[in-house]
Amino acid sequence: MYSSFAYKGRALDVKQIGRELGVRYILEGSVRKSSSKVRINGQLIDASTGAHLWADRFDGGLDDIFDLQDQVTSSVVGAIAPKLEEAEIERARRKPTDSLDAYDHFLRGLGAFHQWTEEANNEALLLFQQATKLDPTFAAAYGMAALCYDQRKGNGWMINRGEEVAETARLVRRASELGKDDAVALNTAGTALAYVVGNLDHGTALIEQALLLNSNLATAWHQSGWMSIYRGDPEGALERFYRAMRLSPRDPYIFDMQIGTGCAQFLNGRYAEALSWAEAAVRHQPNSCPALRTLAASSAMAGRQEQAEKTIAHLSELDPGLRISNLHDLFPVQRAKDIAMWQEGLRLAGLPE
C-alpha cells in the first residue's frame, strides 16, 4: 500500500501509481487549515479498479499537531485493516479458477451464450462442460452450463425435456455446492433452478444469497426481478430491473432486463409502456422468443392488432410448438390472473390454442 498527499507534483492517478509502484491499494489524503484548526481527509482506494473502499475525516487543532498526527495514524490503521481484509477476500472470491485452459473455455462459452441462437447455445454448453472437465471445482462454469438450459427452455430449443431438466438440476447442485462464496455461480444456479427445474423458493434464495455477496451484481438484480414477476409482485420487479439497468446499462443481458420490465408493465395493465419496452428488447434481439411473446401480447392488448399478428407469425416460425395451452410452462407465475392475462393477450394476437 502507498500513502501520499501528492505524487510527483501532478494530479493523483491511482491506477497509474498502482502500476508504477506495484501496489494494490493507495491511501490518499488532503489537509485543510483554517485559523488554528486543521482537517485531514483520507480515503483508501483499490489501485486496480479505482474503487473507494473507505473514507473518513479528522479534525484537530494546531496547538499539538503531533498528537493529531498520532490520532490520525492509529485511527487510519485501525479502520483500513478490516477493509483490506474484506477486499482481499472478495478478490479471492472473484478468482474463478487456477486453470487458464478452463477459464479460456469459460470465456469462449460466454461469448457464444450471448449470441442468443440455438447453434451458439449448443456451442456454449459444450464449452462450459469442457471447462468443468478441466477444473471440476469451477463453480461458475457449472452455473453457466445450467443457464444454457434456461435459455433453451425460454426459446423452445429443448429436445428431451426430462433429461435436460434432470441435467440442469445436477449442474445447479454442483454450482451451489462449490460456489457458496461465488455470487455469479449462485445467481446462475438460482435462475436455472427456478425457471427450468421449477423450484422457485430455493432458486430465489440462491439469487438473494448472491446479492448478499455482491450487491452490485447487475445480473443478480435482473434475475431477482424475474423472481418477483413469478411471485406476483410486478412493482417489486420493476424496482429490481431498473436497478440492474442503472448498474449495467450496456450489459449483454440488457434486452432481457427490458423484456422483464415489459412483462411487469403488462401485468400492471400498462400496455403502452409494456409495448415500448418489448419493442426496445426486440431491437436488441430480433429473434428472442421471450421478447416476441411480450411484444405480441402487449401489441394486442394495446390495440395494435396488425403488429400483434405480424409478431405472432414471426414467433411461430421460431417456436412452432408454442400454444395457449403450454404458456404456463414458459410463464411459471404463481397468480392465476397473471397467466390468464398472458393467455388473453396472445390469444388476441392470434396464437393457436
Image (cartoon, helix red, strand yellow):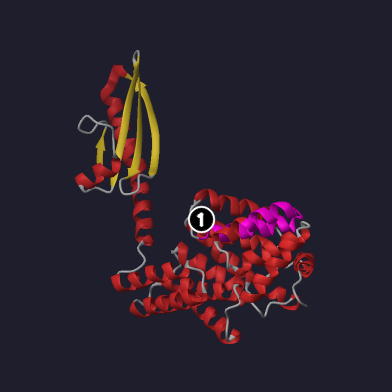
Examine the rendered structure and indicate whether residue 10 appears above or below residue 292.
above
Q: Residue furthest top?
A: 35
Residue picked out by circle 1: 218
Residue 136 image position (x, y, % from top left): 37, 78
Residue at (71% x, 74% y) in the render: 327
Examine the rendered structure and indicate whether residue 36 appears above or below residue 120.
above
Residue 48 image position (x, y, % from top left): 31, 49
In the rendered structure, the answer to whether residue 33 lies left or right of residue 258 reads left
Residue at (64% x, 55% y) in the render: 277
Examine the rendered structure and indicate whether residue 353 appears above or below residue 14.
below
The image quarter in which residue 43 lies: top left
Magenta segment main secondary structure? helix
Residue 290 image position (x, y, % from top left): 63, 67
Q: Say which element carries label 1.
A: helix
The image quarter in which residue 322 lies: bottom right
Res 51 visible: yes
Residue at (47% x, 66% y) in the render: 114
In the rendered structure, the answer to whether residue 205 lies left or right of residue 79 reads right
* Label 1: how many Cα within 10 Å (few below 14, some 14–19, many 20+): many
Tell me the kind of residue under disc 1. Ala
Q: What span is colored magenta in the figure?
A: 253-279
